[in-house]
Amino acid sequence: MPVTRCPEPMLPSASAAGLGALSDDEGSSSESGIAVDSAEAAAKLARRRAKLLKPYLMPSPKRGIIGTSKYAERLRKQIVAAARDTSRRPVMVFGESGLEKSNIAALVHFSGPGRSTNLAALDCARLDWSGAELFGRGDKEGIVEAIGDGTLLLKNVHKLPPSLLPRLRRLLAERTYRRATTSLAALGQGAVALSSQDLAPEEALPPLKRAACRILMTASKQVPNIDGAAEVIKVPPLRLRPADVKDLQRYYLRELARRQGSGGGSMPRLSITDAALKQLESYNWPGNQVELANTVERAVLQQQQMAAAGGAAGKAAGGGTGEWSGRLSEEVFWVAKQAKDRLRLNLLAAYPPLRSFLRSELWPNDINFK
């Protein structure tokens, strides 16, 4: 049977459409113009999003996980597993205050394949009931959209307004969200109880949008509404891993010496006595690593002041120069003592000028105790 070839469809000519004939050069110019307009629109969108994200961007992590305890080793493994998760499942970093949970979340982001993308952080305590800053409102996009395929860190999720918990649950489980509507924003907090059936057709809820970003979270209290929607990394408090105190204080001392050197000053090699280390390891550290870092810095400052005062008194009495060896005793770590021991003080160790005075000619030798 002969095969009949179907005629190709005929397109109306440009002259028939009343547009006039276009030459090949004119057609190419038109396509080029469309491409240029598209590139300019994309560049404009990128600049707008970069400006929106600038206040929220986080730098690379300050430090890794310091310590050799079993808790520190397990924490490292959890971070590596979360960072290598190809499904980019949401992660909750849970623990007490002072455990540097945001730094751990940054480790998850910068240890994974998406390290070249942006990491933005938003404190949930500052969000209002509508969540416009996070999800957007009307024709204005929020951070979850502006971050693109990067990573969004939601800090202090336990402080999120209750009206936003169902929307966060949907974002974690389905990776979808809606922008807040301008009409609902004008109604105030009472609008959170309204559903799509309560609205007029022209005030219908905005369409669902799909989020391309990965969600990381931190919390110091349980958030029942999002249980099971994220992988949980529990950070153990410092009182459960006293073996890590030795490594942590050594790291903080090195950082202090480095900062002092970069500022043009000079500082001897810093270390602490065995008695001081034992005192630090026996303390409960309710403020965890942040409290330990502040305590170490305060102790170094106090020891420097005591050495300077001792040097001045020694010179006045014709004694030594009072140069500090860089060794920190337990007396300068009085903050890390238990409450019952804080009123006990070794005056000679705490105030070197007193020791110099007792050994000087100003103090009678007959009653001097050397």
Image (tube, rainbow, N blue to C red):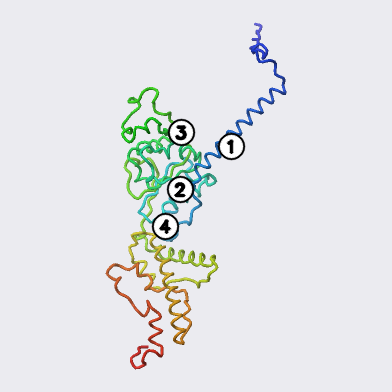
Category of crowding for the residue at label 4, using alpha-carbon neighbours closer than 10 angstroms: few (below 14), some (14–19), many (at least 20): some
Please state which amino acid type lies under the numbered disc 2.
Answer: Ala
- SS state under label 1: helix
Residue 72 numbered mark, or none: 4
Residue hosting label 1: 43
Q: Earlier in the sequence, mark 4 or mark 3?
A: 4
Please state which amino acid type lies under the numbered disc 4.
Answer: Ala
Residue hosting label 3: 210
Q: Tell me if 104 is positioned left or right of 187 in this view.
A: right
> What separation in Å lies between label 4 and label 2 (alpha carbons)?
14 Å
Q: Would you identify the image quadrant in which residue 5 lies?
A: top right
> What separation in Å lies between label 3 and label 1 (alpha carbons)?
22 Å
Residue hosting label 2: 81
Q: In the rendered view, would you say 217 is above or below 33?
A: below
- Residue placed furthest toward the top: 1
Q: Earlier in the sequence, mark 3 or mark 2?
A: 2
Category of crowding for the residue at label 2, using alpha-carbon neighbours closer than 10 angstroms: few (below 14), some (14–19), many (at least 20): some
